[in-house]
Amino acid sequence: MKASALYSAEPIKLDTFNDSITKIVGTITNVVSKTFDTGTKLVATLDDDCWSIVINATNCRVIRAAYGDETDDWIGRALEVYKGTVHYQGREQPGVCVRIPPEQPEPTVSAAELVAPKDDGFKDDIPF
């Protein structure tokens, strides 16, 4: 466990999100357990301690479904954090939610682009 992960990362809270920040997508770099007044919870840091998120039971289920029960297996995996709606204390209210971002497809190149050289306007037949 990196001790710096407990203190250096900016915690993601509801007021983190606004008109210009609607979601945070990052890579999980560390997961630790931390004791709060309400009990022990997991805290994940994203992008080398830039952000941290306290993982509630609902968000934990989302991450576990995608990456497994072992938190060590979450390291290096992508996570999207956004302001959503959660069911808490018998009612729906705004909350910090997570989802697994869709994998970005590899860029595709047509066979013609691979075979045909591009005409960049330069003559490459320079004698040496």
Image (cartoon, grey):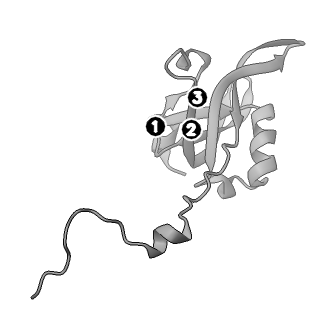
- Determine the image quadrant of residue 95: top right
Q: Residues within 10 Å of mark 3 (few under 14, many from 20)?
A: some
Question: Residue 82: percent from the left, percent from the top?
Answer: 64, 27
Task: Give the left or right position of residue 38, taking residue 26 as reference.
Answer: right
Residue in front for this viewpoint, 44 or 114: 114
The residue located at (47%, 34%) in the rendering is 7
Q: Earlier in the sequence, mark 3 or mark 1?
A: 3
Q: Amino acid at mark 1?
A: Cys
Please, which residue is most extreme toward the right here? Answer: 90
Up-down relation of residue 44 to residue 112 (above or below): above
Badge 1 is on which residue? 50
Residue 40 can be seen, yes or no: yes
Residue in front for this viewpoint, 1 or 56: 56
Question: Residue 74: percent from the left, percent from the top?
Answer: 66, 53
Badge 2 is on which residue? 25
The residue located at (90%, 12%) in the rendering is 90
Question: Residue 89: percent from the left, percent from the top?
Answer: 86, 13
Q: Residues within 10 Å of mark 1 (few under 14, many from 20)?
A: some
Q: Residues within 10 Å of mark 2 (few under 14, many from 20)?
A: some
The residues tagged by marks 1 and 2 sit, at their Cα atoms, a distance apart of 11 Å
User: Are the residues at dot 2 and dot 3 in contact (C-beta closer than 8 Å)?
Assistant: yes
The residue located at (68%, 58%) in the rendering is 73
**Total marks in image:** 3
Q: Secondary structure at mark 1?
A: loop
Badge 3 is on which residue? 23
